[in-house]
Amino acid sequence: MQGILYEEPSIWLFLLVTVIMGGSAAWASGKSIAQTWRPYWQVIPYMLALGFAVRFIHFALFDGHLLTLQFYTVDAIVLLIAGSLGFRYKRASQMTTQYGWLYERTGPFGWKDRTAKSA
């Protein structure tokens, strides 16, 4: 996988910078976008910008390449997944808290209509 998903000599650097550090920033960004009741599409440009920051950390600290489409795409996809999960987690909480008479939680990322008849 080295050379395809990450360029560092060890997968641990990729996991640390992209998945843990970048993923937690993306999760928090997704949650804060949802918390202000903004639409989901706004997560996408934020995660693409955050992808440049993650790529810069790889470049500045670990001698990675700064402007490579392949590794930027991998970083951006990981961040989009984490940001989308954070957005959906917060939105499910909001919908069931704010509109508790209409919706009930079906899991960490979903909700359903309370008034829907079960078949």
Image: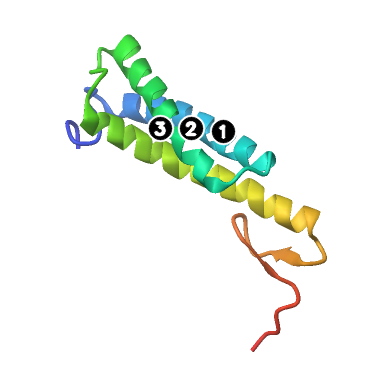
Say which element carries label 2. helix
Q: Earlier in the sequence, mark 1 or mark 3?
A: 1
- Residue at image coords 34%, 33%: 75
In the rendered image, residue 98, in percent from the top left (x then y), is placed at: 79, 53
Q: Which-is-in-front pick, marks 1 and 3?
A: 3
The reply to whether the C-beta atoms of the residues labelled 2 and 1 are less than 8 Å apart is yes
Q: Indicate whether 61 appears above or below 79.
A: above
Horizontally, residue 88 falls left or right of residue 93, namely: left
Q: What residue type is labelled 3?
A: Leu
The reply to whether the C-beta atoms of the residues labelled 2 and 3 are less than 8 Å apart is yes
Which residue reaches farthest left? Answer: 3
The numbered disc on residue 48 is 3
- Residue at image coords 27%, 17%: 66
Quarter placement of the C terminus:
bottom right
Horizontally, residue 30 falls left or right of residue 20, namely: right
Q: Residues within 10 Å of mark 1 (few under 14, many from 20)?
A: many
Which of the colour schemes (rainbow, by chain, secondary structure, one colour) is used? rainbow
Question: What is the distance, in whole Å, between disc 2 and disc 3 at their CAs?
Answer: 5 Å
- Residue at image coords 48%, 32%: 46
Choose between 35 and 15: the one closer to the eye: 35
Q: Which amino acid does label 1 sit on?
A: Ser
Look at mark 2 in the image and give the residue it sits on: 46
Numbered marks: total: 3
Q: Indicate whether 81 appears above or below 4.
A: below
Say which element carries label 1. helix
In the rendered image, residue 28, in percent from the top left (x then y), is placed at: 58, 33
